[in-house]
């Protein structure tokens, strides 16, 4: 979805380096998410934020941190990258709805390789 | 946490109708059922959402029996471009436990 952008799209780094992945959205949504996907597997939730002042850990938050700089921006950091963090990372957004369940809109993904 | 179970993979041929079933035995009263489609190296894309009975849109239909312990995504007359992974999620708008499982890998053959 072009309304959700991620930078960089590809990144190769070395073990121990600090890496930041950025996500921006123009959908005006309050909720933002970071997922990782390993080959052949589903998506696993790393962190999510329901508004600027709200940050929550997901299933696999160890080794990651996030920053919600504004409603439209949500960054994911790897403080000291390790090889098993090599994966495809997705950012997603959703809006609070009354009734129903969140519909998430995903960015194009960032392919991260840690050597 | 509403857990879902789907087949790991399915094969079909162009022009056929494909039905993918998802089991969610511990679905809660407020939970909705949502299906996403994911192509390789792309983020998942919303297909359809429902609460009970049947929902239809321009892409698919979703059938939910009265007990809501399962649901079936129906793709009419599939084409090669429908080859993708399909995920079933169960949850509510303030539910922090919605999870993407491994999904069902659908392969459509000529």
Image (spheres, helix red, strand yellow):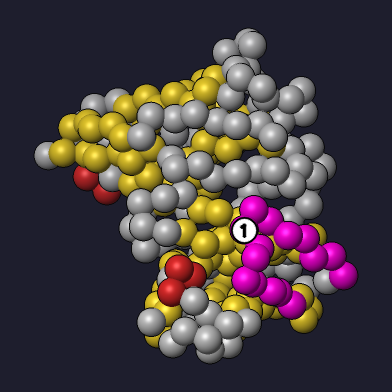
Above or below for B46 versus A6 = above
Residue A54 visible in the shown view = yes
In the picture as drawn, the residue positioned furthest to the left comes out as B110
Q: Nearer the viewer, residue B66 or B41?
A: B41
Q: Residue at x 31, y 35 (%)?
A: B9
Residue B40 picture quarter = bottom left
Helix, strand or loop status at disc 1: loop
Quadrant for the C terminus of chain A in the image: bottom left
Q: Residue at x 64, y 53 (%)?
A: A59
Where are the magenta residues, as a range? A53-67
Q: Residue at x 44, y 87 (%)?
A: A14
- Residue where numbered disc 1 is placed: A60
Location of residue A64 in the rendering, given as x and y in whole percent from the top left corner:
64, 72
| Residue B27 horizontal side relative to residue B81, left or right | right
Above or below for B93 versus A77 = above
Q: Residue at x 62, y 71 (%)?
A: A63
Is residue A92 part of the magenta span, yes or no?
no
Location of residue B44 in the rendering, given as x and y in whole percent from the top left corner:
48, 53
Instruction: Tell me the subunit letter for badge 1.
Output: A
Above or below for B98 versus A27 = above
Q: Nearer the viewer, residue A34 or A31?
A: A34
Q: Nearer the viewer, residue A44 or A82?
A: A82
Q: Nearer the viewer, residue A115 or A4?
A: A115
| Residue B70 horizontal side relative to residue A84, left or right | right
In the picture as drawn, the residue positioned furthest to the right comes out as A53
Is residue A60 part of the magenta span, yes or no?
yes
Q: Residues within 10 Å of mark 1 (few under 14, many from 20)?
A: few
Residue A114 picture quarter = bottom left
Location of residue A32 in the rendering, given as x and y in whole percent from the top left corner:
69, 64
Residue B61 visible in the shown view = no
């Amino acid at each position: 979805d072009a309304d959700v952008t991620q930078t960089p799209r590809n990144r190769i780094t070395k073990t121990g380096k600090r890496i930041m992945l950025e996500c921006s959205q123009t959908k005006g949504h309050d909720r933002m998410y970071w997922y990782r996907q390993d080959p052949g597997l589903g998506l696993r939730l790393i962190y999510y934020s329901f508004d600027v002042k709200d940050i929550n850990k997901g299933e696999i938050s160890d080794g990651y941190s996030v920053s919600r700089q504004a409603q439209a921006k949500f960054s994911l950091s790897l403080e000291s990258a390790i090889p098993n963090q090599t994966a495809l990372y997705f950012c997603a957004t959703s809006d609070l709805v009354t009734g129903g369940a969140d519909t998430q809109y995903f960015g194009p993904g960032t392919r991260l390789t840690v050597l | 946490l509403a857990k879902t179970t789907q087949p790991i993979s399915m094969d079909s041929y162009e022009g056929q109708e494909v039905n993918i079933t998802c089991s969610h035995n511990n679905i809660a009263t407020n939970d909705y059922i949502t299906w996403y489609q994911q192509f390789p190296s792309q983020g998942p894309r919303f297909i359809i959402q429902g609460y009970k009975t049947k929902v239809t849109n321009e892409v698919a239909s979703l059938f939910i029996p009265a007990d809501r312990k399962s649901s079936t995504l129906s793709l009419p007359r599939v084409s090669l471009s429908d080859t993708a992974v399909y995920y079933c999620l169960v949850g509510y708008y303030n539910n922090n436990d919605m999870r993407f499982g491994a999904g069902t890998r659908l392969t459509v053959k000529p």
